[in-house]
């Protein structure tokens, strides 16, 4: 068999560019201003035979010629629709179409709905309008992109050629809308908070730093909207939330991105138990609305969201999984010695020698416990060191009233009974400042303005943050978070 000749892309572009001149000579604008559609493609596909005139538009993704008859498919985000052109109807316009139109071009067609002998709904075209010329051919004759890196870099081609990708991103929108509707229906108000701020506050994370030329100050891209949402609660809002684009200058892997969508909400007069109960209701509602059931399979692992979700303390899971009782080691050095004694090693870019006690506990948990958690479960009572913005537990001041929802080894939700005591908050900020001075780059900065806000008084509050990208990945069976972000950050092409 002779090898298939490889056509130089520049030659294909030149051929298509010449067709622009052909269109112009025929009095056709190769890049039209607009087209009036009567239906989207999926709507027209549902019409009865004989319906018309029907005007639809889209990108041509297939073309077949049979002498004086041609068939093709138009594509839009929600599907494809076949169209048929006949020379005896269109005359010279049929010849123009055949000579000047390529797969990848956008056209609008008007005609009557019919069903072909093969049973496919089709627009029998009475006329067409050329809308936009595609200079580059679609990849692999519309068979799709197989290179994972190219799918991320050319997401627009991935959407055109891969139905799974189209469905995933439409489902992402439904997930966000379902959550938003549920919160709105429970008395929450959506508000906006700053993306640029003077302090990188609201979470334990390494920030991105940039410079504001007008004010001549360095500012941080937000790592979380938390402290501003709490300011709104102090100002009188009872229940607030935000889908906040957030930024953390940390490692990138299957479950972490440098920029991601973080949903946070806060409710006045709740505690963390109220919040756990509400979280379980919200999540089960989301699964039923979007997936139609409380079970899903993620990468061949079955996850069951049905029934009451178990609740374990942080100390319980560490004792169970590695035998380290964190309550017996109130100082960082003692805890590190016990971790070394047990032969536990961390694979992380965090500098272990300078890591504070809270960071060590978090690393230990992520090493020995979290990967084992498949079905949804709540992890409660985190050590005080890990939670500079959470309320101390009334019975045990070494822990805080906090929970995480963990699913398939991923932290999906992080929640507190929020700290509203300004004196306690100021002391914890001092502890975080000391940790930063010792080299802990993930310790939180002191935010005196937030402390001042607290000094004017805050009601009891509970709230949480949820990584939307992680939830979308779970509900769409995506192996990495980059697969659920339309345009993820990548290294530039060389």
Image (tube, grey):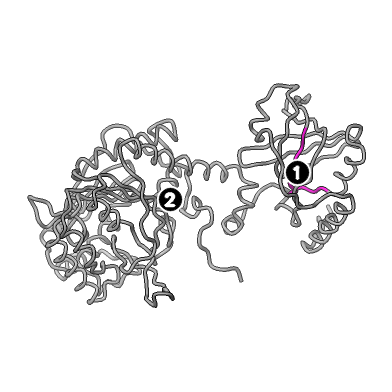
Q: Earlier in the sequence, mark 1 or mark 2?
A: 1
Q: In the depicted view, which residue is nearer to us: 377 or 38?
A: 38
Query: Residue 303 in the image: x percent, y percent?
Result: 37, 39
Residue 397 higher or lower than 63, as above or below: below
Q: In the depicted view, which residue is nearer to us: 209 or 14?
A: 209
Q: Which residue is mark 1?
A: 107
Query: Residue 99 in the image: x percent, y percent?
Result: 88, 48
Q: Which residue is mark 2?
A: 469
Does 442 sit left or right of 179 as displayed?
left
* Circle on res. 292: none
Does 171 sit left or right of 248 as displayed?
right
The answer for how far apart the CA atoms under marks 1 and 2 are is: 35 Å
Q: Is residue 6 visible?
A: no
Query: Residue 139 in the image: x percent, y percent?
Result: 70, 53
Residue 123 higher or lower than 265, as above or below: above
Q: In the depicted view, which residue is nearer to us: 427 or 382?
A: 427
Range of magenta residues? 101-110
The residue shown at (56%, 46%) is: 165
């Amino acid at each position: 068999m002779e090898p298939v000749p490889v056509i130089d892309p520049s030659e294909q572009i030149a051929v298509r560019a010449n067709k622009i001149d052909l269109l112009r000579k025929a009095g056709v604008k190769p890049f039209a201003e607009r087209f009036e559609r009567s239906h989207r493609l999926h709507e027209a596909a549902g019409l009865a035979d004989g319906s018309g005139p029907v005007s639809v538009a889209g990108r041509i993704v297939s073309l077949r010629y049979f002498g004086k008859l041609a068939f093709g498919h138009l594509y839009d985000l929600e599907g494809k629709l076949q169209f048929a052109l006949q020379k005896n109807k269109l005359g010279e316009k049929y010849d123009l179409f055949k000579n000047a139109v390529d797969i990848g071009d956008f056209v609008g067609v008007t005609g009557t709905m019919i069903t072909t002998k093969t049973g496919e709904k089709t627009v029998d075209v009475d006329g067409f309008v050329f809308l936009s010329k595609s200079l580059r051919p679609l990849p692999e004759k519309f068979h799709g992109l197989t290179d994972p890196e190219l799918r991320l870099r050319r997401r627009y081609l991935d959407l055109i050629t891969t139905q799974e990708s189209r469905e995933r991103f439409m489902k992402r929108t439904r997930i966000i809308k379902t959550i938003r509707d549920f919160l709105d229906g429970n008395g929450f108000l959506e508000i906006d908070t700053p993306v640029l701020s003077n302090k990188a506050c609201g979470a334990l994370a390494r920030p991105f730093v940039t410079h504001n030329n007008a004010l001549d100050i360095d500012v941080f891209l937000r790592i979380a909207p938390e402290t501003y949402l709490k300011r709104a609660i102090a100002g009188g809002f009872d229940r607030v939330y935000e889908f906040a684009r957030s930024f953390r200058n940390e490692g990138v892997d299957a479950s972490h991105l440098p920029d991601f969508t973080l949903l946070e909400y806060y409710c006045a007069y709740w505690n963390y138990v109220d919040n756990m109960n509400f979280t379980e209701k919200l999540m089960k509602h989301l699964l039923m609305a979007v997936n139609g059931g409380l079970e899903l399979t993620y990468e061949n692992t079955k996850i069951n969201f049905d029934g009451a979700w178990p609740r374990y303390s942080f100390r319980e899971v560490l004792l169970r999984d590695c035998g380290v009782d964190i309550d017996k080691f109130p100082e960082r050095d003692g805890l590190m010695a016990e971790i070394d004694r047990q032969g536990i090693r961390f694979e992380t870019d965090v500098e272990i020698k300078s890591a504070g006690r809270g960071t060590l506990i978090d690393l230990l948990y992520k090493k020995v416990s979290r990967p084992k958690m498949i079905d949804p479960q709540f992890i409660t009572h985190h050590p005080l060191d890990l939670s500079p913005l959470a309320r101390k537990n009334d019975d045990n001041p070494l822990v805080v009233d906090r929970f995480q929802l963990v699913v398939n080894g991923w932290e999906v939700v992080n929640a507190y009974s929020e700290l509203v005591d300004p004196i306690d908050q100021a002391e914890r900020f001092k502890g975080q400042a000391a940790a930063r001075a010792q080299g802990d780059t993930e310790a939180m900065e002191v935010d005196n303005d937030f402390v001042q806000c607290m000094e004017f008084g805050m009601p009891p509050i509970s709230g949480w943050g949820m990584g939307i990208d992680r939830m979308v990945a779970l509900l769409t069976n995506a192996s990495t978070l980059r697969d659920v972000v339309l345009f993820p950050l990548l290294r530039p092409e060389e």
